[in-house]
Amino acid sequence: MKTELIFVGKTFDKRFDSAIDDYIKRVEHYMPVKVTVIPALKNTKNISEEQQKTSEGELILRQVQPGDMLVLCDERGKEMRSVEFAAWLEGLQARARRLLLVIGGPYGFSKAVYDRADSLISFSRMTFSHQMVRLILAEQVYRACTIIKGEPYHHE
């Protein structure tokens, strides 16, 4: 299964970029993975939050192909322990051709994106910056790969 992490807007802190890149390189040892960054919209002060979500949603949905498993990282999503996330990911490997894990823009996702989504996951009930969530997602995908392979990265 191919996995793609989709982020709306760029990462502003190079330290986060570096750490995310490190985890992506680690994940490549286990499965094909790539990161797609959808450019942030310009002149958003002149549009409503709803218009911004709609425009970002259109850009997200352009990345989705038939048969893709679209998973949104969303505060209302299902929370899982790392071992549960690993089991969930392993189960998808048999069912999905391509997994898209998406972190949306500052206001979340449009109704159209929610309607297309196959699943919602949450890392916490707390709110994290988009920069941090990107790093957490990359690390958790790597952690899941090591759990699936029975490697000693994760300690239970």
Image (cartoon, grey):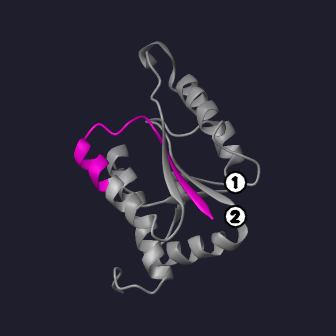
Question: Which residue is under mark 2?
Answer: 96
Residues at badges 1 and 2 in contact (C-beta under 8 Å)? yes
Residue at the location (70% across, 54% down)?
A: 68
Q: 129 and 75: which one is in front?
A: 129
What x and y, as percent, mark residue 115?
71, 45
Label for residue 156? none
Q: Write the start and end of the magenta stretch as one range.
A: 1-19
What x and y, as percent, mark residue 22?
32, 59
In the rendered image, which quarter contains the N terminus? bottom right
What x and y, as percent, mark residue 36?
50, 43
Question: Which residue is under mark 1?
Answer: 68
Say if 154 sits above or below 116 in the image.
below
- Dot 2: element: loop
Q: 20 and 51: which one is in front?
A: 20
Nearer-N-terminus badge (1/2): 1
Amino acid residing under circle 1: Asp
Q: Work out whether residue 124 can be spotted.
A: no
In space, the residues marked 1 and 2 are separated at their CA atoms by 7 Å
What x and y, as percent, mark residue 79?
49, 66
Magenta includes 12? Answer: yes
- Dot 1: element: loop
Residue at the location (61% across, 28% down)?
A: 54
Q: Residue lying furthest top in this view?
A: 46
Magenta includes 11? Answer: yes
